Image (cartoon, helix red, strand yellow):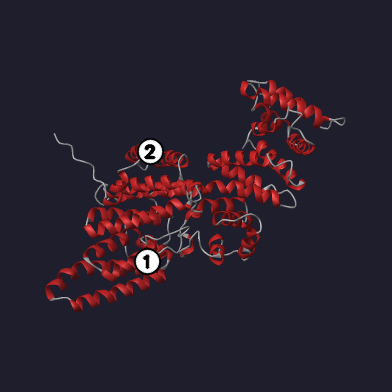
Amino acid sequence: METRAKYVPPQLRSTSRNESEEHSQLRKRVRGLLNRLSESNVEGITTEMSTIFQSIARSVGCQIMSEEILASCSRGPRGSEQYAAVFAALVSGLACLVGIDFGAKLLASLAKCFEDEYVKEDNLSLRNLTLLLSYLYIFGVCSSDLIYDFMMMLSLRLTEVDVSTILTILNCSGMRLRSDDPATMKSFILSIQNKVTELKAAAGDNQAKSRSKRMEFMLETVVDIKNNKKKTKEDTSQHTRIKKWLQKLRVESILLRGLKWSKLIDPDKKGQWWLSGDMVSTTDNIENVAKKIDRESSEAQKMLQLAAGQRMNTDARRAIFCIIMSGDDYIDAFEKLLRLDLQGKQDREIMRVLVECCLQEKVFNKYYCVLASKLCSHDKNHKFTLQYCIWDHYTELESMQLIRSMHLAKFVAEMVAAFTLSLAVVKKADLHDTTQLTSRKIMHFKIFFEAVFEYQDNVVWNVFKRIAGSDQYEPLRTGIKFFVERYVMGSDKPFAGKYKIAKKALKSVEEDIF
């Protein structure tokens, strides 16, 4: 029996060829998860897919997952709203977990896919994609702006397919659209009524009769929605569990506002094109970069001028610098950093810029420590970058300004005490080698260990226990004991109790007294 090949949409066929084995395996894994997706397991599948996403490059993750989600959805059950709703919930949850850029890029892929299927007149695929778009709106990925703009675009052509697509949207989310923006709904209805009148006047009798039935039904639908008489398929009690789950993920933080359909299908999109509905580029001039960073920040221009004088000599570094320095808090800065469309290895600049900002401060600020920990917990690659960045700074201790050295010591102590990094980060310092311990290095690491010993007993215990037991850390343990006993304890021993805990922890393998 001949096995029928699985349908792959045209826009996906080129990507399925010439793909590395690693990416092919990832694609199969994602496809397997999507095949099992249902309303009952959407939370678990979303978590698994977010784990996969965070283990690979963001661009690869966005591409593979967007392609597989759209391929699965477009060829799904005929016009199944439940099927589209579950996929929309998955996309919304993923955007919450991995970043708003995923939702934006999937919407762009959806728009491209819709336009391709429109040319082919594949009504089943078009209906499924339209349902997915409607539920992405219902579940908070995009605002009503995009849906209204899409319907207005369809109303300008108003072919049979356009009428069918508009009806699908109105039946699925019409009352929600009316509730969110009744004024725009009224304008849309007036516009479409005028267009229908024009078409009737221009068409022949037979064509007018053929079109008339479909269009009259659509007109009745929109008027009923306008007058709050339409009983749409929307059910406020439906998908209640999914909506509560998305609320816990703070879905309101990933809402994309001001998007236009023309922007989604624009092949020349660059940078953070989804921000505030205006096209932006990572190579914009200073004024546009300032707007891209934060349109509501009056300090953006000053930040860019400051960045120019602080070794922020690329567009990426300047953008990162402005976000870090202008963030309302560490969460605000973290979320904005995730939205940056950094290419290739540019994401490594985040940690390097962050550490540089910390060292440039006149007074040590723990804000940078909390932000660094948040970034490292989100993506382990930031942790590796941070470690190498610290090691690079260790090579400059001899010539480093005193204030920078003090800030670096306190920063690393905070990272170690927060368990973002382990004490192994100081292994490059060769603390047991007296020939390498200059006065500047001694001062630096004395400040570091004193800062660690300032923490509570249980923190000190766990910090030192992390390097206990393993043979590879034996030289490090020896060096730490040598350095602390010789340079930190001294004649005055305010940290004697903490060091006693540290020594016991270094000898411990299984014991946990705290």
Element at badge 2? helix
Q: Dividing the picture into quarters, in which one does residue 470 lie?
A: top right
Q: Position of residue 400 (x, y in %)?
A: 73, 45
Amino acid tagged 1: Asp
Amino acid tagged 2: Leu
Q: Residue under circle 2?
A: 26
Front one among 510 and 389: 389
Q: Residues within 10 Å of mark 2 (few under 14, many from 20)?
A: some
Q: Position of residue 444 (x, y in %)?
A: 75, 39
**Residue at the image position 48 percent from the left and 58 percent from the top:** 272
Q: In 3D space, how far apart are the residues under numbered discs 1 and 2 (Cα atoms)? A: 35 Å
Q: Residue under circle 1?
A: 149
Quadrant showing the C terminus: top right
Q: Nearer the viewer, mark 1 or mark 2?
A: 2
**Residue at the image position 42 percent from the left and 58 percent from the top:** 142
Left or right position of 196 against 142: left
Residue projecting furthest to the front? 435
Q: Is residue 275 visible?
A: yes
